[in-house]
Image (cartoon, rainbow, N blue to C red):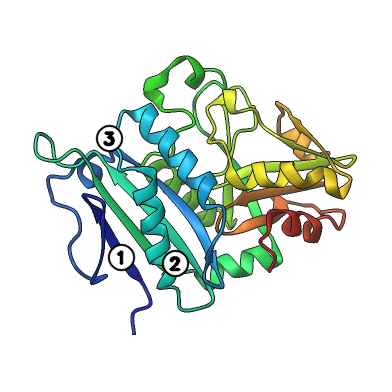
Amino acid sequence: MDSRRVAVLDHRTVTLIDPAAAVFSAFDLGPSRGDGVFETMLVRSGVALKPEAHLDRLARSAALMGVPSPRRADWARLVEVLTAEHGGGEAALKLLLTRGIERVSEYTAVGTLSPLSPEVLDQRRRGISVVALTLGLPADLRATSPWLLGGVKYLSYAVNMAAQRHARALGADDALFLSLDGQLLEGPTSTLVWARDRILHTPPVETGILPGTTQALLFAGAGTAGLGTAVSPGGLADLHAADAVWLVSSVRGAAAVTRLDGVPRGDAGLTPLIQQLTGISP
């Protein structure tokens, strides 16, 4: 039995459809040009995690791209309908918004629910090996070039997926992007966090990285665990000198980096605490 679910949001009405049915027109600007935005949240025990933060970021991304969007309440209803379909275990709930069919429709809004792969759950438990790859852009370029869509979760993730495939070809689990001038950025589907002397660091969003919802939740609760927080530019040397490094995301959670560019590294025993603060423990 197919445990995946698909729902379409049209004129404030949410309709569940056959997961194998066609959803997008061949003329839709989403699949044809990657012109749209998306969000992905984790569903655990029938509960969607951080839905408000994801809806906030979806609205921000849509506004920055100038993509018309359904009402927030309608998106919330879509999340509610898909969450109610959750049959157990853990699942990824994805919201997709495209610019629709040119001169025909304002937008296309779709939601999907699919179980997590064993690989994602395993990486959360055991940690990940990571290689650093250049993004090919100076760290300050996207802040002054809005057409590069810095900080926008847009549909076209071809470069991100290619980076992950390249990392796997090199024998690693994931990648970490660096700017052309060597500054730390983010993972293809994650936010970078590192710890040094009980202070958690993350790169500045002014570099054009996506503001992380899981990183924000982690930093909001860090003080309760006696951890400080800082937004810090850095380079690979900072990660090699760190007590611990994680790639954090809404679905995988906080995955400890156990090897960086082939160099083994530890986590100072901090990963269970970090995973607890993100609300996503193995």
**Between marks 1 and 3, how big is the CA–CA gap?**
21 Å
> Is label 2 in a helix, a strand or a loop?
helix
Q: Which residue is mark 2?
A: 83
Using the rendered view, name the quadrant where residue 266 is placed.
bottom right
Q: Quadrant of the C terminus?
A: bottom right
| Earlier sequence position, callout 2 versus callout 1 | 1
In the drawing, what numbered circle is on residue 51?
A: none
Q: Quadrant of the N terminus?
A: bottom left
Using the rendered view, name the quadrant where residue 145 is placed.
top left
Against 67, is 45 above or below? below
Residue 218 in the image: state x and y as whole percent.
71, 47
**Is residue 97 toward the left or the right of residue 229 in the image?**
left
| Earlier sequence position, callout 3 versus callout 2 | 3
Q: Which residue is mark 1?
A: 6
Residue 243 can be seen, yes or no: no
Residue 164 can be seen, yes or no: yes
**Between marks 3 and 2, how big is the CA–CA gap?**
24 Å
Kind of residue sitting beneath label 2: Thr
| Earlier sequence position, callout 1 versus callout 3 | 1
**Is residue 260 toward the left or the right of residue 244 in the image?**
left
Against 25, is 85 above or below? below
Against 116, is 179 above or below? above
Residue at coordinates 13% horizontally, 50% vertically from top-left? 26
Task: Check whether the beta carbons of the residues at disc 2 and disc 1 lie within 8 A of each other.
Answer: no
Residue at coordinates 41% horizontally, 68% vertically from top-left? 114
Q: Nearer the viewer, residue 59 or 125?
A: 59
Viewer-nearest of discs 1 and 3: 3
Using the rendered view, name the quadrant where residue 61 is placed.
top left
Q: Which residue is mark 3?
A: 68
Kind of residue sitting beneath label 1: Val
> Is label 1 in a helix, a strand or a loop?
strand
